[in-house]
Image (cartoon, rainbow, N blue to C red):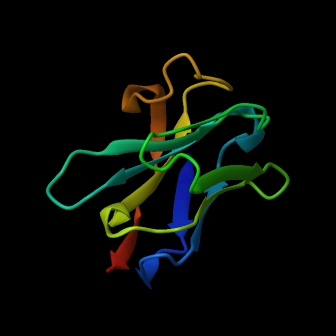
Amino acid sequence: QVQLVESGGGLVQAGDSLRLSCAASGVAFSTYAMGWFRQPQGKEREFVAYIASNGGSTWYGESVKGRFTISRDNAKNVVYLQMNSLKPEDTAVYFCAQARAYDVSWNYRSSSQYTAWGQGTQVTVSS
């Protein structure tokens, strides 16, 4: 059974950086694309970033493009989200998710393409 565990969230000030990690177990990690989503309190979950299984393809939500970077270490079964120049509007619970295939770049924004989710980690950015 797949288990995804996020870490690295916290309370930071606007302009600071954070790196989120998502450790995967119970899955052939290197054969699946991965994504990060976030859900601000009282709002719907939204796409943040996507990476194909071999790291060769990455995509970002418009609001984080140029500030966030997704990466993965298939030897360690970990996917990362480096978040720079954080803004108060980045405040949310961040979730990592395993895609249903090695590459879902044709529809990476849709949560329906992801079959396993972590429990989430809170990121709070103060102004």
Name above or below for residue 126 compared with residue 101. below
Q: Residue furthest left?
A: 42
Q: Can residue 119 be seen by looking at this rendering?
A: no
Residue at the farthest right position: 75
Q: Which residue is painted at 79% across and 35% down in the image?
A: 54
Q: Residue at x 47, y 33 (%)?
A: 114
Pick the front one: 23 or 123? 123
Q: Position of residue 65 (x, y in %)?
A: 53, 46
- For the point 37% across and 53% down, the residue is 38
Please tell me whether residue 83 is drawn above or below residue 28 in the rendered image: below
Residue 87 in percent (x, y) is at 39, 67
The image shows residue 106 at horizontal and vertical percentages of: 55, 16
Q: Residue at x 29, y 45 (%)?
A: 45
> Is 124 placed left or right of 3 in the picture?
left
Vertical comparison of 12 with 78: above or below: below
Q: Quadrant of residue 110?
A: top left
Q: Which of the 4 image quadrants contains residue 33?
A: top right
Image quarter in which the C terminus is found: bottom left
Q: Is residue 50 left or right of residue 79?
A: left
What is the tally of numbered marks visible in this picture? 0
Residue 21 appears in the figure = yes
